[in-house]
């Protein structure tokens, strides 16, 4: 950094229901904000054209307050001299707002707006911007990462965090703060991940302060993601690009330190109890992992969803090994549960994609997915990479790593061949079922988790009701919902579960179901057949999940949805 005033930016890229920017120029705050995805807001307002060398921006994913222009960030103090953008939830905002309302004017319904007003009070009493930010942050309960600018100190951005992620980046002429390194990867891959309670001042220099406001030295490190990995490279959507990258992602996930794998495998085998915790798609990867641990290494473990895990803390102790699975490494529910488990003395292993993420930093051992950035909000390549790590761990636990690796790599070209084979049929199927409002996915054994994942993908990007369940569970209630032409996706590779799963498919057919079979072989009961290659039973999830991801993708397109930005879902869910 040179001694002149440098352009600095804060950018949060975790949401997309509204967006806004504030810069400082000519002694005042210049700002634009509006409802819509970033490109829509940019279409309406000249965000790039705002003057100044300092700027903070935000894309919102509403938690408190409707999706309206006034609720979009940045938020301001009464005199519009301070602007703030914020990720997270201020849990005590109501109490703070009630206290501040007697002499402050609030215009939005958000929890965030208390922050600029708190800063305003401290600055009016003579505090510098960083002192005011520190004091204001001490008043907040909940999780936050926020950045503030003030016209009184127009050459700096001050930011701090608790529980929500914040990363600082710098190249020779600019510095950045963001919720995710991807936000500025085009400019630099040199980063510092801020710790809880720390503060950063981007000014002529970059200064880090600890939770008491004392300067601390933080070293910049390089993240190994490249900007071109985060571009569409000719595909219409990131989701399709990332599905196509899956064979490569599996190969990259296998590049692990064998000693670390062995240490972790021994840790798992020696633990009195092993619990895997995760949310959403990562939890379905964990369910496959549980099956692999049992089938390949005779190790039983439980899988508990992140948001429920903390409620089991009575039975988590120093004899527990927790394996947390999260592509982002920032999912608040997972982090909360892991924190509790750590307090109880548990050992923490994690499987994450984002190097330096909060979860990685709080874990005793970490395996990275190594699949590069995943931009599509719906998880696809990170799912198969998580499966790959579970294969590596399970085969190491069974003392058969080399053999397992060879078999795993053999599956990759089979996945690749499947793309060409099924793509037309899946597009047709998506068109054929585009007016359907309910989908059911059934499977047994290792593929049950794939039924659940197939349904989740359909639900999150096509906005239709979809349920995945063990095929045997169907008759305990859900059969009542099967009507004429209800699509039922039956995942039934030709293993020891085949006959029973087909019998369950017959039960749905008897009620009029439109049966979509996912199998190596056609069966007369299928109305449509999605062919999968023959692989050993334990590897089936890798070949059954891909056509279901594609079916969800084509269904989203057939229904006019944007598969990369499904409504009401964020790439990193950093709120509880
Ligand atoms: C599914 C999806 C979500 C995530 C979940 C966990 O496509 O995107 O269900 O899987 O929010 O996210 P991570 O893996 O980052 O913890």
Image: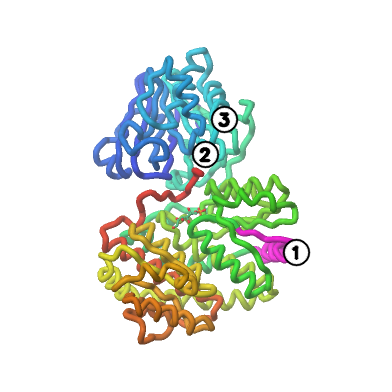
Mark 1 crowdedness (10 Å alpha carbons): few <14, some 14-19, many ≥20:
few
Mark number, residue 270: 1
Q: Residue 167 location, x and y as percent?
A: 52, 41
* Label 1 to label 2: alpha-carbon separation: 39 Å
Q: Which numbered disc flags the more N-terminal residue, 1 or 3?
A: 3
- In the image, taking residue 370 as reference, residue 11 lies left or right, namely left
Residue 216 belongs to the span the image colors magenta: no
Marks 2,3: beta carbons within 8 A? no
Name the residue located 49 percent from the left edge and 74 percent from the top edge.
Answer: 472
Q: Which numbered disc flags the more N-terminal residue, 2 or 3?
A: 2
Mark number, residue 168: 2
Whether residue 372 is visible to the viewer of this picture, yes or no, is: yes
* Label 2 to label 3: alpha-carbon separation: 11 Å
**The residue tagged with tag 2: helix, strand or loop?**
strand
Magenta region, residue range: 257-276
Residue 260 belongs to the span the image colors magenta: yes
Of residue 437 and residue 273, the one placed in the foreground of this image is 437
Name the residue located 31 percent from the left edge and 64 percent from the top edge.
Answer: 555
Q: Residue 297 location, x and y as percent?
A: 67, 73
Which residue, given by chain and number where applicable, does mark 3 sit on? Answer: 207
Mark 1, mark 2: which one is toward the viewer?
1
């Amino acid at each position: 950094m040179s001694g002149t005033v440098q352009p600095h930016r804060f950018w949060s890229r975790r949401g997309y229901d509204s967006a806004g920017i504030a810069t400082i120029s000519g002694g005042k705050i210049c700002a634009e904000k509006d409802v819509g995805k970033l490109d829509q807001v940019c279409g309406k307002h000249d965000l790039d054209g705002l003057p100044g060398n300092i700027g903070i921006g935000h894309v919102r994913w509403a938690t408190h307050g409707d999706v309206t222009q006034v609720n979009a960030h940045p938020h301001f103090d009464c005199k519009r001299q301070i602007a703030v953008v914020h990720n997270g939830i201020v849990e005590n905002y109501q109490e703070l707002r009630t206290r501040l309302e007697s002499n402050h004017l609030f215009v939005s319904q958000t929890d965030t707006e208390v922050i600029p007003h708190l800063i305003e009070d401290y600055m009016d009493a003579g505090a510098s911007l960083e002192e005011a930010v520190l004091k204001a942050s001490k008043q907040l309960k909940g999780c936050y990462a926020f950045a503030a600018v003030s016209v009184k100190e127009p050459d700096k951005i001050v930011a701090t965090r608790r529980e929500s992620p914040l990363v600082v980046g710098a190249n020779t002429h600019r510095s950045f703060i963001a919720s995710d390194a991807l936000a500025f990867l085009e400019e630099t891959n040199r980063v510092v991940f801020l710790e809880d309670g720390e503060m950063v001042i981007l000014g002529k220099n970059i200064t880090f302060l600890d939770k008491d406001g004392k300067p601390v030295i933080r070293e910049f490190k390089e993240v190994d993601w490249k900007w071109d990995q985060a571009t569409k490279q000719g595909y219409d959507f990131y989701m399709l690009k990332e599905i196509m990258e899956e064979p490569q992602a599996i190969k990259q996930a296998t590049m692990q330190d064998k000693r670390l794998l062995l240490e972790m495998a021994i840790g798992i085998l020696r633990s009195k109890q092993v619990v895997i915790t995760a949310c959403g798609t990562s939890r379905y990867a964990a369910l496959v992992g549980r099956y692999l641990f049992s089938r390949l290494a005779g190790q039983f473990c439980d899988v508990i969803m992140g948001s429920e895990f903390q409620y089991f803390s009575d039975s988590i102790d120093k004899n527990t090994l927790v394996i947390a699975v999260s592509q982002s490494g920032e999912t608040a529910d997972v982090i909360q549960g892991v924190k509790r488990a750590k307090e109880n003395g548990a050992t923490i292993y994690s499987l994450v994609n984002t190097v330096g993420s909060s979860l990685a930093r709080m874990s005793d051992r970490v395996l990275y997915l190594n699949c590069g950035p995943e931009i599509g909000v719906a998880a696809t390549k990170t799912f198969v990479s998580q499966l790959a790590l579970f294969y590596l761990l399970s085969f190491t636990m069974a003392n058969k790593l080399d053999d397992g690796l060879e078999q795993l790599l053999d599956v990759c070209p089979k996945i690749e061949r499947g793309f060409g084979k099924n793509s037309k049929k899946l597009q047709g199927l998506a068109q054929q079922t585009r007016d359907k409002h309910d989908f059911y996915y059934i499977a047994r054994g290792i593929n049950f988790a794939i039924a659940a994942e197939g349904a989740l993908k359909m639900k999150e990007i096509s906005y239709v009701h979809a349920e995945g369940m063990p095929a045997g569970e169907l008759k305990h209630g859900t059969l009542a919902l099967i009507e004429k032409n209800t699509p039922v996706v039956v995942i039934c590779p030709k293993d020891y579960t085949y006959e029973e799963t087909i019998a369950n498919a017959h039960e749905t057919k008897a009620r009029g179901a439109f049966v979509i079979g996912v199998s190596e072989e056609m069966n007369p009961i299928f109305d449509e057949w999605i062919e999968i290659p023959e692989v050993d039973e334990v590897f089936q999830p890798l070949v059954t999940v891909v056509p279901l991801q594609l079916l969800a993708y084509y269904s989203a397109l057939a229904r006019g949805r944007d598969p990369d930005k499904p409504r009401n879902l964020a790439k990193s869910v950093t709120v509880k």
